[in-house]
Image: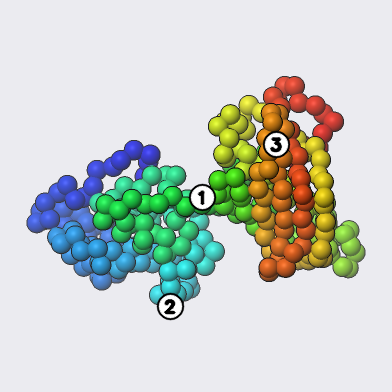
Amino acid sequence: MSNEATSTNQNQSPSDPSADELLKETLKRCSPETITAALAFRQSGDISLVPTVVLGIVERFLEPEVVDTLKSGDDSVRFMEDLGMDSLTMFEAIMMVEESLGVSIKNEELWDLRTVGDLKGFIAAKLSGVEVVAQAKSFPIEQIAAVMPQQEPFLFLQSAEIDGAKAKGAYTISGKEDFLKGHFKGDPVFPASIMLEALGQLGVFHFLTTDESASGGAGSSIYFTGADGVRCSRVCRPGDTLELSVELKRRRDPLVVYSGKITVAGEKAASAEEISLIVAPAEGASASGAKE
């Protein structure tokens, strides 16, 4: 895949034996049903064949123990969380879908395809000439880590979704966080200060991925300058998933202000009326702030 349009198999004659043999070679590790459906689609353009081809290709990249999850699940089955596919495997599977069905998917579009239903619907829309409506953009941990100044073990954001001025994220408390050994001994409790840090990190990620002047954070540093109206409503422990959300309230360079909240299983855990970040050139950034 690339950001450029690719040549499609549909440019070849449906009756071209060499094209059919090439398709069979491409799908040689897929089920016979997948190959038959792909050949039939090439000849007829029947959109109803797309799910069989897409599911067959996805199955080809799965570990045996999760194949039943794909077959017994529905369109809500998630590639990474439910099927264990990493981003590289996703790229390989999508490239095979492109080649088999004669479509082109841009790299930035790939990150929005989080579930089996997303992929099937997207491909069907592409083949039908229907405009694909932009949705909230999702980011896996690989993309988050590539953008954020924080890294393991001080990165408290495992997934994120950006929709305009708003962002959502998630972090599951593993219990292996080193600071839990002393907070508290024999009774691990996720610190409220780290919950606030996680909200600040989501704000940083939103800024770095939506503000063109940030240039991916390459030419600036972002510092935490303050928080107002902070409330903690729930104790969070290992096994809890922090569901984070922030919304941009205002910006007046170099200050960026977000509001934020955290829930766990729908229950309010923490909130902040304002989280203030300051963006400064790396060379001139003040050392007095706590870097986000």
Please tell me whether residue 72 is drawn above or below residue 143 in the rendered image.
Answer: below
The image quarter in which residue 49 lies: bottom left
Q: Is residue 112 left or right of residue 103?
A: right
Mark 1–mark 3 distance (CA, rounded to whole Å): 21 Å
Can you tell which of label 1 and label 3 is closer to the viewer?
3
Tell me if I can see residue 150 in this picture: no
Disc on res. 256: 3
Mark 1, Cα crowd under 10 Å, few <14 / some 14-19 / many 20+, is some
Q: Residue 258 at what x, y percent from top left? A: 70, 44
Question: The C terminus is located in which quarter?
Answer: top right
Q: Which residue is mark 2?
A: 72
Seen at 61% across and 49% down, the residue is 166
Badge 2 or badge 3: first in the primary sequence? 2
Image quadrant containing the N terminus? top left
Q: Residue furthest top?
A: 283
Measured as percent of width and height from the top left, residue 281 is found at 69, 24
Q: Position of residue 227 (x, y in %)?
A: 81, 44
Residue ID at (76%, 39%): 276
**What's the residue at 87%, 68% (across, down)?**
187
Which of marks 3 and 1 precedes in the sequence?
A: 1
Give the residue number, with chain letter if any, for mark 1.
Answer: 137
Mark 2 and mark 1 lie on one chain; the one further toward the N terminus is 2
